[in-house]
Image (cartoon, rainbow, N blue to C red):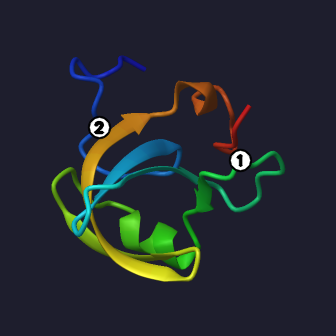
Amino acid sequence: FDPPADGQLPAVLIGTIVELEDLNNQDRLTLRLINPFCLDILPEDISFLSEPGKQLLMKKVGDIVTLQIHSTTKLWRISAVKPDYQELGSPFLCPG
């Protein structure tokens, strides 16, 4: 795998890190889209089968999405999509 020159990917995929910006107050949130069968998950991990995961999958930088996270629904702009280099060797796209 050759990493992109600017470190960004063209769309949100399983195994990517997604940086989001809240459109109301410019708060930032970083999530990682993972396989739902992963055992070692982190607080920022979301399954691509979850509702937020489905909303993010295949979206591009600059796209605006409505996500419900922690019982709060907000509008977010995707500000970056980066590969998670830890997952590249994993056959199931799981952390670690």
Rendered location of residue 54, percent (x, y): 46, 73
- Residue at (29, 37) in percent of width and height: 9
Q: Residue at x 35, y 20 (%)?
A: 3
Q: Secondary structure at mark 2?
A: loop
Give left or right: position of 37 versus 84.
right
- Quarter of the image with the C terminus in it: top right
Between residues 28 and 41, which one lies in front from this camera angle?
28
Q: Quadrant of the N terminus?
A: top left
| Disc sitting over residue 42 in the figure | 1
Quarter-of-image position of residue 37: bottom right
Task: Estimate the x, y position of residue 8 in percent, counting from the top left.
Answer: 27, 32
- Label 1, residues with CA under 10 Å away: few <14, some 14-19, many ≥20: few
Please, what is the three-letter code of the amino acid marked with disc 2?
Leu
Which residue is rendered at x = 51% and y = 32% of the image?
A: 84
Mark 1 or mark 2: which comes first in sequence?
2
Q: Which residue corresponds to mark 2?
A: 9
